Amino acid sequence: MGAGDATMAAEQTASPAMRARGSRNDQTRRHNLSALLTAVHYGGPLTRAQLTRDTGLNRSTIGGLVAELADLGLVVEDSAAETGAVGRPSLIVRPRTDVVSLAIHPDVDALEVGAVAIDGTVVGRRRVALDAPPSAESAVQIAAAEARFLLGSMPGVRVAAAAAAVPGLVAMDASTVVDAPHLGWRGVSFGERLSDALGIPATVGNDANLGLRAEWGYGAAKGHDNVVYLNGSASGIGGAALLGGVMLRGGRGYGGEFGHMMIRSEGVECSCGRTGCLETELNAVALDAAAHDDEALDALARTLARAVANLECAFDPDVVLLGGFLGTLYEEREALIETEVDRHSFLPKAEGASIARAALGGNRLLIGAAERAFMPLLADPAGTVLIQR
C-alpha cells in the first residue's frame, strides 16, 4: 500500500474516538498499538485508566502496549501532578513532542513550513513572503530550504513524514495537484517532488479538507461528525464537509468546492470560468473595501448567509464552521447572518445547525497537513520508520 493509499484508508474510519477502539485478540497487536497511540494523539495526556476506557482494552494489555510505544520512542509515561487524592499519583501517558511531521502550505502570497508534534502542537514554523504565486518547482525549492533550516534548529527531532495543504484540486493519489488556478498549477506531481527534495514520504491534500481535519481533531469541530466548513483566504474560498465522520471526497476527490457554488447568475467571471461564484461575490478585496461601509458590509453578510443556508439544506450539518475572513465577517455581523440563514434555510429554526468561527487560526493548515502526514504512523506505529534529524 502506497502513502496515498494508506492515507485514504485511514481517512475512511468514522471518527478519532472510534479509531481508538482496540481488540483483545493477540493477533492484532499492531491494531491495538494504533488504537492506543491514536487515543493519546487526540486526547492526551491520558492515564492508563482513561486509556482502558477509551480503547476497551484491559489494564494489563494497556500496560504492555504503553511499554512498547515507549520503547518505540512515541510516548512517555510520567507522574501526574498531585491532586490531593489518597494513594499513589496516577501515571500519565503523553505523546513525545520530539516526534514531528513537516507541514507545507504554498499560497499566492507566501509559503509556510511548520513542524508539528504528534500532540498537535506547532513547535516551529518558517514563513516566506512572496511577490507572486510560486511555481511548483520554486515551491518545492523554498519548502526544502526552509525545512532544512527549521529542522537544523531542532536537534534530536524525529520526522514521521511531510504533507502539503494546497488551494486546489488534489487527485485521489494524494500527490497530484490536478488544478490550483490561483497558483497556476495544473497536473503537478507535487507530493512526489516534495518527497524527493525532502528525503521523506510526502503527500498532498486540499487546504480546506485539511483545515477541517485539524478543527475536527483539535478545534471547534471536535466532538461533531457532521460539519460543513468554509474558509476565506487570499486564494479564494475553500470548502469541505464531514458527513458521518467521513470527509466528503466525491468520485475523483474533488468534493467540497463550495467557493464555486453559484450565488448570482449575472455575476462577474470567476477563475474557474463560471460566473457569479461565491468567491467572486465575497472575497478579501470586497471585504476590505467594505470595512467602513455598513451597507456594503451588510450586503456581504447576506451573501454569506445565503451560502450557509444552501449548505445547510444540502448537508444537514450539526455545525457550520467559518474560517479566515469569513470568520471575521461572521463576528462583525453575527446577528444579521444568523437571522438571514434562518430566513433562507429549509430546516426548522430549532433544528438548524449552529454557526461558529474556526478556532485554530493561523495554525489550522499546518496542523491539518501534519494530520495527513501522521496517518501512516498512527495506523502502524511499530512499522513506520522515523527519520532522525
Image: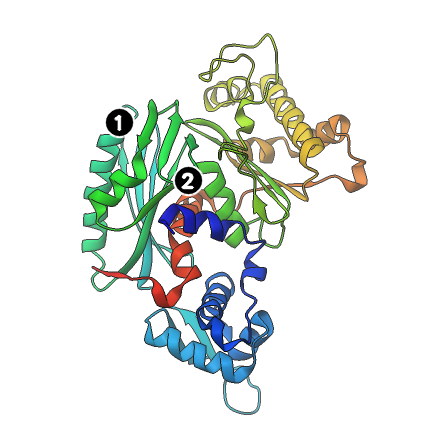
Q: CA distance from mark 1 to mark 2?
A: 17 Å
> Could you say where residue 366 lies in the image, as x and y percent from the top left?
39, 46
> Could you say where residue 190 lies in the image, as x and y percent from the top left?
30, 36
Of residue 358 and residue 3, the one placed in the foreground of this image is 3
Q: Is residue 174 visible?
A: yes
Of residue 141 and residue 4, the one placed in the foreground of this image is 4
The three-letter amino acid code for the residue at tag 1 is: Ser
Which residue is drawn at the image coordinates 21% and 49% (left, top)?
A: 199
The three-letter amino acid code for the residue at tag 2 is: Gly
Q: Furthest residue to the top? A: 266
Q: How many residues crowd around disc 1 within 10 Å: few (fewer than 14), some, or many (20 or more)?
A: some
> Could you say where residue 224 lies in the image, as x and y percent from the top left?
63, 51
Left or right, 235 with respect to 83, comes to: left
Badge number at residue 270:
none
Residue denoted by label 1: 135
Dot 1 falls on a residue whose secondary structure is loop
Relative to 272, residue 74 above or below: below
N-terminal label among 1 and 2: 1
Which residue is drawn at the image coordinates 56% and 18% (left, top)?
A: 293
Relative to 135, residue 191 above or below: below
Badge number at residue 205:
2
